[in-house]
Image (spheres, coloured by chain):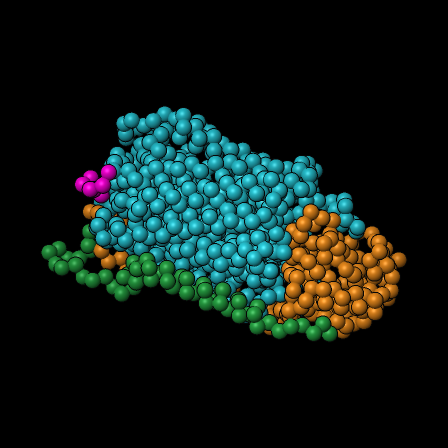
Chain colours: A green, B orange, C cyan
């Protein structure tokens, strides 16, 4: 039950509680972080690697 | 829910974004500090430590890399073992090693304490460079030249085990690295990969 | 928790939860197929461990590599993902008293997964996919191998999408009040990681399939390894999240474990969502394709924030168990709550072994060998399977087994068959896996390679003489493997007998022990009548830093010490190597 004084209107949950409850926001953030930090950066590393000269 | 205490199977009632109690805060702080130590160790070892997988990393054509390896082997060849050239490059040299199904080419003879730039790549499949018994492990990828600066620390007759599955002959793929000390010992003798840090008698 | 749900359902007599009639068969079919995959994987495990135990060396080379691929696919993909589909159907519907979104599509997706796994099995067993579980190009398998995996992944991704849709339905139809239960939150975490995983699977398997039929000229081996591992290791992180969710669930069911602080536990799950998948990079630490900056940032789960999350759960789960027990009156000493816990309940013992082995063995070894430079002494040695058998098997699979002992009576409405065997099964499995993991880890420290048929190197041009201790530790691995397989086959026997030939539960009796029904259901844990008062007293300032859960603080302290010692010992071992850079 709502953790509020009896008879009162329930307060809106704090910002972070609402953010944490937003499953689709978390899905988006999880995808974005992975696609940028791991996949995107990793692809950039491989694709920008210079050709070797075999000295 | 009639009580404040609840389990993970109960919906979380009302406002649960509340401060944690002291023990939880203390543990999280300790764990966080340990995580920072874990993170700091890696850059620290780059700065102060002697083993890092940095290297000079380049794209190469597998066939061209192999040809360069053959050229290198011909240039510094001093002998042969089971048909594979034994190659002794001078300290500071660009050294080439190719992994291919199912051998490591060539056999390298290096000097303890000397530094080399060891280029590794594959002619065909992924291979795993595993220097035994030191347990130095690197991935050898076709199309990529992994040029690591290496300094052998002691003399011995070492083996290169392939530890990445490369086909049915994978477990027959063993190479050899000889490291001689200042006096030029041990001589190539194909006995066990024993670490010898004294002059052989 | 009302019985006024408008869709066809039954109300669970034990928990009062609403079980939608459309969801129940989906939960069951996925769980059953999971156990079938476990059987295939376990038989493969037996053959493999008797081959790597060099003194026995059972299989010939071709079959060793072939069965190794079968073992990987069946355990790491089929068993675990089918079971997780069951978990998603369960968590989204039963735990929220909701109806499932589009069950027809759920059945279609299941069929896709079934067809996909059948194609993969066929390809592997008939020698058309001798490329191991990772299938690194330029190694190439039959096109149907890749197609099978793609179909399986599409099916699984669809079910994951249906899980999210079910969450929306439950919210809209107000089937629960407040925020979703923590166990469901853990399932959400698993589902999000599953999307990350399967997306990368599509990115890599579709081009690889096209290459196998000749439409694409070549697949860059380094790009493949990077994207494959975003699938391969992230799929194991799905397992971590699902396992932790099940820890909270079993804690509640077996002993009345509570949630200490929702904010803390949910924050840990959010850290998983954001940062756990990138550590797939720890498979690429000694690859030429990436800079040290990329390696360090990614392998560290972004400054170890996901490790922080695991360490948080590593505290809140046992602490929730301790607090739950203290609130039931088990307040004697530091560890009375643990000593007097129901060790004869296989759901409970599995829970504890899962936490302990995952944390102490799996977690500590994993973070250590996943360090950029320490990986140099570990990559592709037997230390790697030593680590992951302690996490995904002794951790996740063990937790799933524990959950099964409760789901058999609750969902299948059957008594657990072979009850005396069931009570010791977790002990057998945990001990066996512990010995196997430690045997492998020690062998790997001596340089023994993974995925390798013959470490006597009988057919190699040069000899390799391993330290004689290697024979001993491989024997330990072998014996551990035999024990673990016995434990796994026992579990499968119990599950199959219970589901297909078991005694149905017709009435629910509480208040006395009943063979075949875990004590958490026959004598449900009940907190003291003045539980909130007791809770406040346990959290009083005057108790100081020990707080409500002093026993757990001691346990995590021991864990931290073990972690620090193991970690720095490995740096020391690394320092003996050649200079490399």
Comparing C179 with B81, the one in front is B81
Residue at point 43%, 65% (across, down): A33
Q: Would you say C264 lies left or right of B152 here?
A: left
Image location of residue C100, percent across then percent down: 30, 45
Image location of residue B38, percent across then percent down: 51, 64
Q: Is residue C303 above or below residue C339?
A: below
Q: Is residue C5 magenta?
A: yes
Comparing C368 with C326, the one in front is C368
| Residue C208 location, quadrant | bottom right
Image location of residue C1, percent across then percent down: 22, 43
Comparing C561 with C112, the one in front is C112
| Residue B155 location, quadrant | bottom right
Comparing C288 with C436, the one in front is C288
Q: Is residue C426 magenta?
A: no
Q: Which residues are magenta?
A: C1-8
Residue at point 20%, 55% (across, down): A3
Image location of residue C303, percent across then percent down: 47, 66
Residue at point 30%, 63% (across, down): A19
Q: Is residue C446 visible?
A: no
- Label count reads 0
Q: Would you say C333 lies left or right of C218 here?
A: left
Residue at point 55%, 40% (across, down): C122
């Amino acid at each position: 039950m709502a953790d509020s004084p009896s008879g009162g209107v329930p307060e809106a949950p704090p910002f972070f509680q609402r953010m944490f409850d937003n499953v689709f926001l978390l899905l988006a953030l999880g995808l974005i972080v992975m696609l940028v930090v791991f996949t995107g950066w990793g692809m950039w590393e491989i694709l920008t690697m210079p050709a070797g000269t075999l000295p | 829910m009639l009580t404040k205490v609840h389990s993970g199977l109960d919906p979380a009632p009302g406002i649960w974004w509340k401060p944690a109690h002291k023990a939880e805060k203390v543990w999280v702080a300790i764990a966080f500090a340990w995580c920072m130590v874990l993170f700091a160790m890696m850059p620290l070892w780059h700065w102060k430590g002697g083993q890092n997988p940095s290297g000079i990393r380049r794209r190469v054509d597998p066939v061209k890399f192999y040809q360069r390896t053959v050229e290198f082997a011909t240039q510094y060849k001093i002998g042969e073992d089971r048909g594979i050239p034994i190659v002794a490059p001078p300290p500071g040299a660009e050294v080439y090693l190719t992994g291919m199904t199912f051998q490591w080419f060539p056999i390298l003879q290096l000097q303890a304490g000397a530094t080399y730039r060891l280029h590794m790549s594959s002619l065909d499949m992924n291979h795993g460079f595993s220097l035994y018994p030191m347990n130095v492990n690197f991935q050898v990828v076709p199309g990529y030249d992994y040029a690591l600066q290496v300094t052998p620390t002691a003399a011995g007759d070492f083996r290169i085990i392939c530890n990445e599955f490369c086909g049915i002959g994978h477990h027959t793929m063993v190479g050899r690295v000889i490291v001689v000390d200042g006096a030029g010992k041990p001589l190539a003798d194909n006995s066990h990969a024993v670490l010898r840090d004294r002059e052989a008698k | 928790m009302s019985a006024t749900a408008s869709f066809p359902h039954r109300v669970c007599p034990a928990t009062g939860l609403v079980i939608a009639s459309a969801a129940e068969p989906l939960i069951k079919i996925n769980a059953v197929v999971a156990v079938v995959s476990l059987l295939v994987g376990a038989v493969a495990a037996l053959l493999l461990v008797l081959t790597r135990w060099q003194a026995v060396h059972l299989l010939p080379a071709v079959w060793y590599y072939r069965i190794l691929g079968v073992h990987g696919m069946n355990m790491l993909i089929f068993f675990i993902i089918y079971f997780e589909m069951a978990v998603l159907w369960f968590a989204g519907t039963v735990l929220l008293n909701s109806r499932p979104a589009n069950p027809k599509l759920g059945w279609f997706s299941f069929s896709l997964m079934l067809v996909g796994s059948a194609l993969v099995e066929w390809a592997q067993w008939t020698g058309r996919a001798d490329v191991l579980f990772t299938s690194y190009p330029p190694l190439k398998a039959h096109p149907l191998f890749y197609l099978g995996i793609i179909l399986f992944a599409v099916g699984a991704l669809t079910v994951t999408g249906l899980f999210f849709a079910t969450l929306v339905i439950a919210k809209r139809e107000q089937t629960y009040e407040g925020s979703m239960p923590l166990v469901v939150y853990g399932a959400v975490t698993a589902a999000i990681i599953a999307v990350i995983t399967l997306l990368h699977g599509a990115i890599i398997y579709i081009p690889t399939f096209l290459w196998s039929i000749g439409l694409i000229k070549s697949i860059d081996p380094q790009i493949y390894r990077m994207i494959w591992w975003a699938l391969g290791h992230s799929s194991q992180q799905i397992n971590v999240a699902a396992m932790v969710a099940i820890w909270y669930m079993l804690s509640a069911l077996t002993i009345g474990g509570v949630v200490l602080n929702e904010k803390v536990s949910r924050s840990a799950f959010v850290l998983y969502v954001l940062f756990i998948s990138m550590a797939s990079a720890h498979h690429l630490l000694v690859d030429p394709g990436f800079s040290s900056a990329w390696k360090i940032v990614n392998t560290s789960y972004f400054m170890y924030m996901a490790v922080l999350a695991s360490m948080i759960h590593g505290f809140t789960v046992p602490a929730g168990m301790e607090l739950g027990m203290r609130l039931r009156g088990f307040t004697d000493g530091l560890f009375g709550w643990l000593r007097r816990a129901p060790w004869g309940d296989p759901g409970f013992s599995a829970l504890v072994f899962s936490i302990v082995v995952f944390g102490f063995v799996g977690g500590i070894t994993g973070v250590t060998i996943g360090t950029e430079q320490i990986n140099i002494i570990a990559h592709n040695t037997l230390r790697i399977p030593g680590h992951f058998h302690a996490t995904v098997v002794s951790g996740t699979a063990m937790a799933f087994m524990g959950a099964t002992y409760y789901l058999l009576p609750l969902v299948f409405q059957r008594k657990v068959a072979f009850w005396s065997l069931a009570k010791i099964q977790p002990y057998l499995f945990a001990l066996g896996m512990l010995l196997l993991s430690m045997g492998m880890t020690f062998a790997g420290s001596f340089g023994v390679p993974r995925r390798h048929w013959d470490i006597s190197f009988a057919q190699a041009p040069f000899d390799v003489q391993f330290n004689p201790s290697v024979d001993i530790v491989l024997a330990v691995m072998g014996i551990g493997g035999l024990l673990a397989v016995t434990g796994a086959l026992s579990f499968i026997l119990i599950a199959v007998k219970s589901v297909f030939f078991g005694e149905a539960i017709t009435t629910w009796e509480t208040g006395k022990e009943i063979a075949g029904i875990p004590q958490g259901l026959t004598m449900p844990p009940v907190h003291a009548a003045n539980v909130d008062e007791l809770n406040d007293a346990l959290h009083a300032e005057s108790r100081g830093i020990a707080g409500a859960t002093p026993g757990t603080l001691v346990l995590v302290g021991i864990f931290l010490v073990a972690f620090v010692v193991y970690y720095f010992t490995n740096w020391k071992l690394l320092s003996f190597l050649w200079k490399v850079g």
